[in-house]
Image (cartoon, coloured by chain):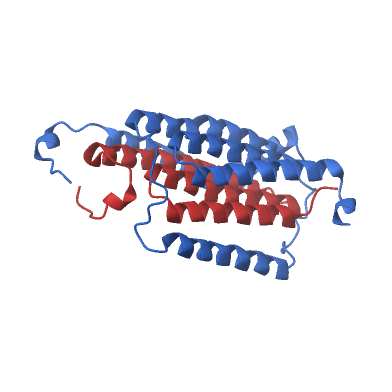
Amino acid sequence: MNVPAAWYLVLAAVLFGIGAFGFLTRRSALIMFMCVELMLNAVNLTFVTFSRTLSDISGQAIVFFVMVVAAAEVTVGLGIVVSVFRRRSSTSVDELSELKG
Amino acid sequence: MIAAAYAVPSILVFVTSALLIVVGAIGVIAVKNPVHAALCLIMTLFGVAVAFVAQSADFLAAVQIIVYAGAIVVLFLFVIMFLGVDRREHVNFEPLVGQRAFAGVGVVLTIGGLVTLMARSHWVTGAVSVTTPLSSGNANVKELGDAVFTTYLFAFEATAALLIIAVVGAVLLARRERSVQSEEVAP
């Protein structure tokens, strides 16, 4: 018999917490993007766990779409980081305190 | 003894994936070098893939490795090395006083509340699907394909448009502009 769903749900909650903590404390835009990936993975893990427990394939289909959106988000986000780095020579988000380029 | 109720292999798989996930995630937020953080991120992604396989989401596990570890992290590494930001960051500098403590308290409250809520509501609620339990292996790919191309067909087409928009937007953002260089203001 497989381990209960609760174990995976707690693991996903811990992963989400670690990602959120990193997102709140680190200042490099690249690391912050990685922390967003951690949080997205935690949510994916939750979806798959519910999908297994409820025998419903919809959870896995939604994880599929989350992955697509994450890929698009990283593409655009890293494009923004590159263009910010060209102007500021830094990826620290503290230096982006004003909206004008 | 709680361990006696479940098969030893599934417990071992869970412990392996949990170790990979937690150690990798702590590595992402703790190491100073962005390249090392990206490598730790790969470790976490492999752990999540192990958890996917253990829960009969075989196709998603493969996609996790191919898309996340293969494409997204490589994109991260490419940008890190392209920008040359692989030098160390001062992790201990706090622009806001007590930022780290506030973040820690907020995160602990969030996780604690979440776990408490889930524990009080018997973890998983809702109607179990009336069809047969999810199968693994090739049948998982077939089930997922059936769902994506029938029930979620509109969303699937929308993601195609989203990916096109993202690619065009990334090219537009990362393109080097020639005329604006002269009026650039020093920060």
Label count reads 0
The picture places residue B6, in percent across and down from the top left corner, at 86, 50
Which residue is depicted at the point 56% across and 35% down?
Answer: B42
Furthest residue to the left?
A: B182
Q: Residue at x 35, y 35 (%)?
A: B85
Please tell me which residue lies in front, A69 or B44.
Answer: B44
Task: Give the colour of chain B.
Answer: blue
**Image quarter (top left, top right, bottom left or bottom right) of the N terminus of chain B:** bottom right
Question: In the picture provided, is A43 more to the left or to the right than B14?
Answer: left
- Identify whether B116 is placed above or below B32: below
* Residue A69, visible in the rendered structure: no
| Residue positioned 42% across, 64% down in the render | B98
Counting from the top left corner in percent of width and height, residue A81 is at 33, 41
B109 to the left or right of B172? right
- Of B123 and B81, the residue lying toward us: B81
Which quarter of the figure has residue A90?
top left
Q: Is residue A83 visible?
A: yes
Chain A, hue in figure:
red
Image location of residue A101, percent across then percent down: 20, 47
Q: Which residue is drawn at 61% across and 68% down?
A: B113
Q: In the displayed structure, does residue B33 sit left or right of residue B46? A: left
Q: Position of residue A98 (x, y in %)?
A: 23, 55
